[in-house]
Image: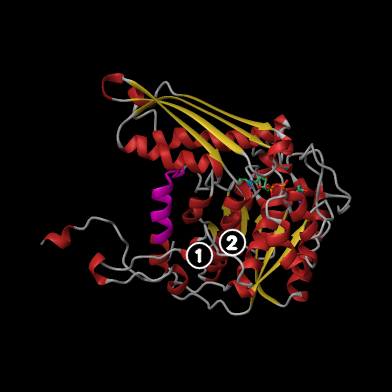
Amino acid sequence: MKKPSEIKPATGKLGVLLPGFGAVATTFVAGVEAIRRGIAEPIGSLTQLNTIRLGKRTDGRTPRIKDFVPLTELDDLVFGAWDPIPDDGYASAINAGVLQKEKHLDPIKDFLTSIKPMPAVFDTSYVKKLEGPNVKSGATKRDLAEQLREDIRRFKKENDCARLVMVWCGSTEIYVRPSAVHETIESFEKGMDENHKDIAPSQLYAYAAIMEGVPYANGAPNLSADFAALESLAKTKGVPICGKDFKTGQTLMKTILAPGFKTRMLGLSGWFSTNILGNRDGEVLDDPESFKSKEVSKLGVLENILQPEMYPQLYGNMYHKVRINYYPPRGDNKEGWDNIDIFGWMGYEMQIKVDFLCRDSILAAPIVLDLAIFLDLASRAGMSGIQEWLSFYFKSPQTAPGLYAEHDIFIQHWKLKNTLRWMMGEEMVTHLGVEYYD
Ligand SMILES: NC(=O)c1ccc[n+]([C@@H]2O[C@H](COP(=O)([O-])OP(=O)(O)OC[C@H]3O[C@@H](n4cnc5c(N)ncnc54)[C@H](O)[C@@H]3O)[C@@H](O)[C@H]2O)c1
């Protein structure tokens, strides 16, 4: 890919479009507004807090990322959403039960109630456990995609946006494998005309976004923009895309811990992970077909980090199991419990237990913010197609066909920052450091 010669400035408003206005999406928009009003801090967000070292360690140049690359300011963000459930932002956030009503929702009630979800493209065949009246109708999937495109154009005009991005925060759809219909844009468009069963609603949002020149990120594990037809459409239209499945909670822990075991050449005989959660996401994932999408996304991580084919004596016989159990009393505050069986010198066994009393949407919200802001940066820098440098944020990073994904969070972080340096014409940081000893 060619290095951007010029990055367009971030002037004007950036509209952030959110298919799915549940726990993650409302925690994200409420958080941004609370930060803008000075009642919260943007914890967990690289675009708002992280610094970046430039040049040598002795140069003393370590600006904030946001002072180094031209990013959209929080004050310039406006939000739009679609959801089959018609609740406005306040009602949906109350229902999600993530943020405290008196402390964080009531002070921004006017703002939250002003965001009302547009009628969604929704079909219960793809999300079995949900129903809602706020849905579009259309004879074909192509009609529905066209209605989404109209929504996008109308939103942009009504809100006077200079640019848009879309981040899928909708429920996890059933597991769909890429098939012939996903191969080319012609087969995909024909499939939409014929209401092909392998074309799920999230794919229609992704198609609509790319056709409208809107960068797209997929926060769920289902097939959405990660197939040949939309990947090549994104290239042709000059639109950046990335996915999939926000890396939060248990998988975040896995990609922090597993690289550590591997760097020390410690063996792993088993990793048993179980979750209890009681939010709407948990209810949707209680359906085996939606769980299958999640399971595939969660399981790939360890294999990829540990490379059992290269280290058969360490990881060749590892037993990896992931369970998600819907347990209503927990709400959004899930418990992710891991039992890790490792072994060291001469094969002696040890155990590690991790009990993460986690707040899923609190971990996901800054990811939505960073993706929206970085995708917009990529777009202004003229970058298009798969943005692998954003794999830091995903459980199943989207990569070029045939290229294995990097799951190690530290490699991903390094890659992200080097991409920013590369975009701005700064030297890459290699951490070699021999020059300090000459
Ligand atoms: N919270 C996390 O940490 C996390 C991590 C990784 C992935 N995810 C994924 O992010 C997504 C959102 O999670 P959540 O906790 O906010 O779930 P949620 O159930 O609270 O919200 C999802 C919303 O999407 C809506 N929806 C479903 N199908 C839709 C469609 N076709 N169009 C528009 N809206 C639609 C639902 O009505 C619901 O309001 C889920 O797919 C989840 O698996 C979440």
Screen quadrant of the C terminus: bottom left
Q: Which residue is mark 2?
A: 369
Q: Can see residue 17?
A: yes
Q: Which contiguous range is marked in magenta?
A: 404-417
For label 1, the SS is helix
Tally of marks: 2
- Within the image, what quadrant is residue 313 found in? top left
Q: Which residue is mark 1?
A: 47
Q: Which percent across, then down, holds residue 393?
A: 52, 51
Q: Residue flagged by tag 1: what amino acid is it?
A: Thr
Q: Circles 2 and 1: CB distance less than 8 Å?
A: yes
Q: Is residue 19 left or right of residue 241?
A: right
23 above or below 340?
below
Q: Which percent across, then down, holds residue 112?
A: 75, 64
Residue 406: in magenta span = yes
Q: Is residue 277 left or right of residue 1?
A: right
Q: Which percent across, then down, holds residue 334?
A: 63, 40
Q: Main secondary structure of the magenta part?
A: helix
Screen quadrant of the N terminus: bottom left
Instruction: Tell me what residue is drawn at x 50 percent, y 65 percent.
Output: 47
Residue toward you, 432 or 365: 365
Residue toward you, 382 or 378: 378
Residue 263: in magenta span = no
Q: Residue flagged by tag 2: what amino acid is it?
A: Leu
Residue toward you, 261 or 291: 261
